[in-house]
Amino acid sequence: MKRIVFLLVILMALTYFTNPGYEKHLNKLKEKFADEYAQFAESGGDFDAAFEYHNYYFFSTTTDKASDLHELATIGILGFVL
C-alpha cells in the first residue's frame, strides 16, 4: 500500500511540474493552424485571443473560442502538447 501511495505522489508531482504552459500550447496552435495564423497575421488580428488556456495543474488544454462549440484544440501533459 505504501508503494502505491508513493508512486501516486511521484506521478502527481511529475505531472504537476511538467505541465506545459500557455506558450507551448500557443506554439503548437500556430503549427496546427498555420493557414489561419497567417490570415490573422496579415489582417493584424490577435491569434492567441481566439483560444482559451485551461490549467488543470496536472495537465492543460486550450479551447477554440472562435467556434460556437468551444472545441478542444490542444492537450498538454508531461511537457508535451498534442
Image: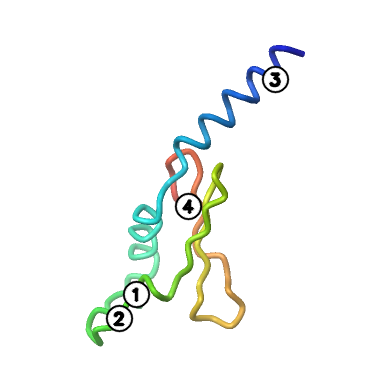
Does residue 31 lie above or below 80 as drawn?
below
Which residue is tagged 2? 40
Frontmost of labels 3 and 4 is 3
Marked residue nearer the N-terminal end (1 or 2): 2
Say whether marks 1 and 2 touch (CB < 8 Å): yes
Marked residue nearer the N-terminal end (2 or 4): 2
Which residue is tagged 1? 47
Residue 24 point in image, percent of width and height:
36, 52
Q: Residue type at mark 3: give it.
A: Val
Q: Residue type at mark 1: give it.
A: Phe
Give neighbour class at mark 4: few <14, some 14-19, many 20+ (Cα, 10 Å).
few
Which residue is tagged 3? 5
Residue ID at (50%, 72%): 64
Does residue 56 lie above or below 34 as drawn?
above
Q: Is residue 58 left or right of residue 22?
A: right
What's the distance in space between the residues labelled 3 and 4, CA to CA?
29 Å
Q: Quadrant of residue 51?
A: bottom left
